[in-house]
Image (cartoon, grey):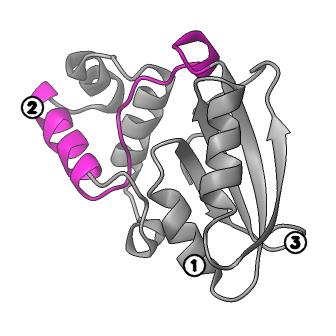
């Protein structure tokens, strides 16, 4: 599955109730065995495995280990607010290609782009912001919101 979410993948997926229930089970525990998911949703283990594979292949979901970057070698994380002149999608594409960017959205409001970055230290963050992001054609200015402590990070919002 590609690292970058594409416009095509962001289209609303029409899921049946069983697929939604499978997703909710995995949101609670991404390591939950297919057999126990099957019992909860009324399918065989093999049927759950096939559905999960289709959900992954279609880009509806990913199964990943979510970490606190500050505890796994990236003690400096920040949200960057970026204002652009010209083509905001070109700026977003350039930023999305950076390995330090783990989340990026094009927004309406005070910033054109919000991007979360994870870095090894303050020098690394400075290099990303000053030498790389600000060097992208079309970047007018940036504002950096340094994370001091991760208090909440959840992915259990369910499905609609």
What residue would you read off at disc 2? 46
Please, is residue 133 above or below residue 51 in the view? Answer: below
For marks 1 and 3, the one nearer the N-term is 1
Name the residue rendered at 90%, 68% in the picture: 110
- Badge 3, how many Cα within 10 Å: few under 14, some, many 20+? few
- List the residue tagged with mark 1: 89
User: Is 83 in front, or is 50?
Assistant: 83
Give the side of residue 115 with respect to residue 42, left or right. right
Q: Position of residue 48 (x, y in %)?
A: 20, 35
Residue 159 screen position, x and y as percent: 54, 48
**Residue segment shown in magenta:** 45-74
CA separation in Å, label 1 and label 3 = 16 Å
Q: Nearer the viewer, residue 30 or 36?
A: 30
Asked if residue 115 shows in the view, the reply is no
Quote the CA–CA distance across marks 3 and 2. 46 Å
Residue that badge 3 annotates: 109
**What x and y, as percent, mark residue 137?**
62, 77
3 or 2: mark nearer the eye: 3
Q: Earlier in the sequence, mark 1 or mark 2?
A: 2
Counting from the top left corner in percent of width and height, residue 28 is at: 50, 23
Label 1 CA crowd tier, 10 Å (few <14, some 14–19, many 20+): some
The quadrant holding residue 88 is bottom right
SS class, disc 3: loop
Looking at the picture, does residue 27 appear above or below residue 99? Answer: above
- Nearest-to-viewer mark from 1 and 3: 1
- Which badge, 3 or 2, comes first in the chain's sequence? 2
């Amino acid at each position: 599955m590609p690292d970058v979410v594409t416009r095509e993948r962001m289209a609303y997926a029409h899921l049946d109730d069983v697929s939604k229930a499978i997703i909710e089970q995995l949101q609670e525990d991404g390591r939950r065995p297919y057999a126990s998911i099957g019992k909860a949703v009324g399918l065989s283990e093999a049927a759950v495995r096939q559905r999960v594979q289709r959900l992954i292949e279609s880009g509806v979901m990913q199964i990943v280990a979510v970490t606190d970057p500050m505890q796994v070698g990236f003690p400096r994380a920040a949200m960057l607010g970026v204002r652009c002149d010209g083509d905001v999608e070109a700026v977003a594409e350039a930023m999305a290609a950076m390995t330090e960017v783990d989340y990026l959205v094009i927004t309406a409001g005070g910033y054109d782009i919000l991007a979360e970055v994870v870095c090894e230290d303050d020098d690394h963050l400075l290099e990303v912001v000053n030498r790389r992001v600000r060097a992208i054609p079309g970047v007018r200015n940036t504002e950096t919101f340094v994370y001091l402590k991760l208090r909440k990070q959840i992915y259990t919002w369910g499905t609609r």
